[in-house]
Amino acid sequence: MTTLRGGPDSVYDLLGIGFGPSNLALAIALHEHGATPDGGTGPRVGFLERQPAFGWHRGMLIDDATMQVSFLKDLVTMRDPTSDFSFLCYLRERGRLVDFLNLKTLFPLRVEFHDYFAWAAARLAHLVEYGAEVVTVRPVTEDGEVRFLDVTSRDPHHPDRLTVRRARAVCVATGLEPHVPPDATLTERVWHTSELLPRVAELTRSGAPVRRALVLGAGQSAAEAVDYLHRSFPDAEICSVFAKYGYTPADDSPFANRIFDPEAVDLYYRAPREVKRSLLDYHRSTNYSVVDMELIESLSRTMYQERIQGRQRLRMLNVSRLREVVTRADGVRATVEFLPTGERQTLTADLLVYATGYQPQGIGDHLGEIGKLCLRDEEDALRVGRDHRVVTAPHVTADLYLQGGTEHTHGLTSTLLSTTAVRAGEICTSLLARRGVGAPG
């Protein structure tokens, strides 16, 4: 297991907080410029990840679910098509390159792309310490300048064991966290979709009966959860509850997809605030609360077939809201309101699954004191440069980079895989230029 050196005598050029796909892509870019955890001729870098091993949305790795972005938008190809960290190089090493090409698809299985990420992460295991939960980031002042950032982490299994590492720059990429309604209470029978697979497996092993399950939400995760529960519990009624009339198809048309082009980030960044708002509103259907048409059609066919057979297990409680949930030891009692009439019905269910999406983790959760040195705009949002570096007070020479949480400055791709490779390259270039360490010739 890697242990990155700590203490004020070991100064990193960059410490990354989080080691999901975004910081993994950055680690690759820096590795390709000679980065090591001990320095040398290249930059000295390290990454801290609170999970015990690499993992990316494990709870939704449904066996037949495919990616929603092309495999060419992997960790490196959009930045450097010749990199040996590409998905195609992964396939070659796994002995599946020809077989994948014969599938004639741009969209791999999600489980396969996760394995690709894990393959890349394993090659960079010397740069990351797992089981390291960052608890504080503190500024270090010398001669009136904040020149360093001290990053304190702890082992989740041994909270009293704290390690402090000093860095000239920090890159925060802590990803998204599950979002549930403020009044929701998660239990053994009430979950977020992020826990779907392990929870279903646990129920299946226990042999506990599932007669009815409710899924709240109208996006891709909701539709996938409905489909998976319907297949996993063949005797259960699966009810999808959402306020729309029906699932909205994702807009993945060629012109709309240009919003994810690297050049679109430049245009968005320079645009006036009102134009940015309009672009987000216009193109929300490319990403938010939308479902792949193939899955919509599959669920529709299933419902129709069940009507023919006279046993309808799949129910769409559309134009409806969940008004009250009473948890019980063996499930929930939920009140669902049909919005056009206000009519309410009470359903007893063995499961309630919140497919209510994700939200960026608050930057203040990790920055503490340094957060006070970050400059904000008129709407109290962080000011972020085009190179993804937070604008700080004049006396701060240490750098803080963000991957995620920058939708207000960089657009829809802030939390998506579409420009991960390009964004990592931009941060790498900025860091090397500002630090003058191992810069490309």
Image (tube, rainbow, N blue to C red):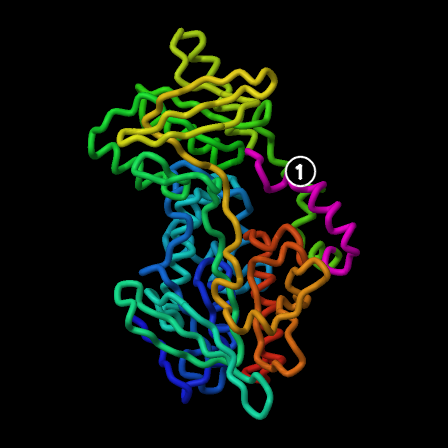
Classify the position of the C terminus by image quarter.
Answer: bottom right
Q: Amino acid at mark 1?
A: Ser
State whether residue 44 is above or below residue 386. Answer: below
Q: Is residue 102 visible?
A: no
Residue shown at the point (58%, 35%) measured from the top left: 290
Residue shown at the point (48%, 54%) measured from the top left: 88
Predominant SS of the magenta segment: helix
Residue 75: horizontal and vertical position, in percent? Answer: 51, 59
Disc 1 on helix, strand or loop? loop
Residue 389: horizontal and vertical position, in percent? Answer: 62, 70
Q: Is residue 207 visible?
A: yes
- Bounds of the magenta span? 268-291
State whether residue 167 is above or below residue 230. Answer: below
Residue 89: horizontal and vertical position, in percent? Answer: 45, 58
Q: Is residue 253 magenta?
A: no
In the picture, measured across the screen, residue 214 lies left or right of residue 169, that is left
In the picture, measured across the screen, residue 51 lies left or right of residue 343, that is left
Please name whichever residue, 426 or 368, is drawn nearer the observer in this view of the structure: 368
Residue under label 1: 253
